[in-house]
Image (tube, helix red, strand yellow):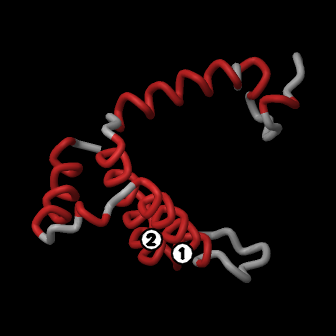
Amino acid sequence: MTQDTINEVLKFRDDRDWKQFHNPKDLAISISLEAAELLEVFQWSAEDVVCENKLNKIREELADVVNYCILMADACGLDLDEIVHEKVQLNNEKYPVEKAFGNKEKYTELKDK
């Protein structure tokens, strides 16, 4: 994601004077609600995990989740590139390729091959 995209989201918020409402608690709630709307796209789909006919709704809901994540990072003074990079590094430690490759187990359940 580019800084221009982040700035566009923040400008949208600022143009409407909504920053006053964007505290971490309410933004966390909003992220969860939007993620639930994304999950709703797949509700009652049984074994149907194909996304092609659902892409428009997925795009819309995923954008909402990301937008609220941008707002949350801004409200908390966090740099998205930095926190994502740090999380990938942590996950690299928790899920070493030699243990995790092709394995869906949680890191606490991974075994040496």
Dot 2: within a 10 Å radius of its alpha carbon, few (fewer than 14), some, or many (20 or more) residues?
Answer: many
- Identify the residue shown where x is 32% and y is 61%: 22
- Alpha carbon distance from label 2 to label 1: 6 Å
Quadrant in the picture for residue 61: bottom left
Q: Earlier in the sequence, mark 2 or mark 1?
A: 1
* Residue 2: x %, y % from top left: 23, 42
Which of the two residues, 2 or 8, is positioned nearer the viewer here?
8
The residue at the far left in this view is 15
- Identify the residue shown where x is 61% and y is 22%: 92
Describe the element under mark 1 as helix, strand or loop.
Answer: helix
On the picture, is 95 further left or further right than 21?
right
On the picture, is 102 further left or further right than 9?
right
Tell me if label 2 and label 1 are in contact, CB under 8 Å. Answer: yes
Label 2 sits on residue: 61
Q: Check the picture and name the quadrant holding the N terminus.
A: top left
Quadrant in the picture for residue 77: top left
* Residue 40: x %, y % from top left: 61, 77
- How many marks do you count on the picture? 2
On screen, residue 105 above or below 30:
above
Amino acid at pointer 2? Glu
Dot 1: within a 10 Å radius of its alpha carbon, few (fewer than 14), some, or many (20 or more) residues?
Answer: some
Amino acid at pointer 1? Glu
Describe the element under mark 2 as helix, strand or loop.
Answer: helix
- Identify the residue shown where x is 71% and y is 74%: 48
Q: Which mark is residue 37?
A: 1
